[in-house]
Image: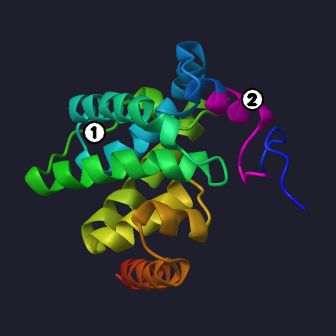
Amino acid sequence: MAADPKRAPTCPGFENQDLASIRDAQAGSLSAFEFLVERYHARIYNFIWQFVRNQHDAEDLTQDTFVKAYRAIARFDLRYSFTAWIFTIPRRSAINHYRRTISTEELDSDLALETSDPAQAAGLADRAHSIWQTAKRLLKPKQYEALWLTYGEGFSNAETARIMRSNPIYVKVLLHRAREVLKRKLMQSEVL
């Protein structure tokens, strides 16, 4: 039995509006692509920032990501996760940038966690920032990347593997090792 070409494929993680926008963008609709940019901009920016640690570089690489995505969206296969696909673009750019330079600029406060209590939000943001800085300092780059994609971005192991151009088993190994390193460090801190 042949598949109906008009029937929407089942794509994990797609919302109907995403799928419609992706299809429209593939057909050349600039407004549909703008919807996707608005939807994914903050996540892509934050992902890139984790590598470059510089606001201006992160902004430039984020813009570059969407230019590249716009040029390549016609080739995107709807059977796969759009989010995983779009994250492969900034990953390559951020890794190349990271290899060239390392910066320590602070994350903008407007990207902090949203909560009704500003003191609680500041505390949570400081704590999260501290944990991620410790992870960045202690972990190997691939371990940190797997940790960020899984816990920072909420990707599944399969999606993380796709973004990292690896396999889910390797991602599980990276995550296990990363958690062990962080666990040892946290236990040492509690003892001191």
Frontmost residue, 92 versus 186: 92
Q: Which residues are magenta?
A: 10-23
Name the residue at the right extreme.
Answer: 1
With respect to residue 27, does 98 lie above or below? below
Distance CA(mark 2)–CA(mark 1): 34 Å
Q: Residue at x 85, y 57 (%)?
A: 2
What scheme was used to colour the molecule? rainbow
Residue 5: give its label. none
Say which of marks 2 and 1 sits in front: 2
Q: Is residue 97 left or right of residue 24?
A: left
Exactly how many numbered labels are in the figure?
A: 2
With respect to residue 40, does 159 lie above or below? below
Q: Is residue 77 left or right of residue 45?
A: right
| Residue tagged 2 | 17
Quadrant where the C terminus is found in the figure:
bottom left
The kind of residue tagged 2 is Gln
Q: Residue at x 22, y 34 (%)?
A: 57
| Residue tagged 1 | 106
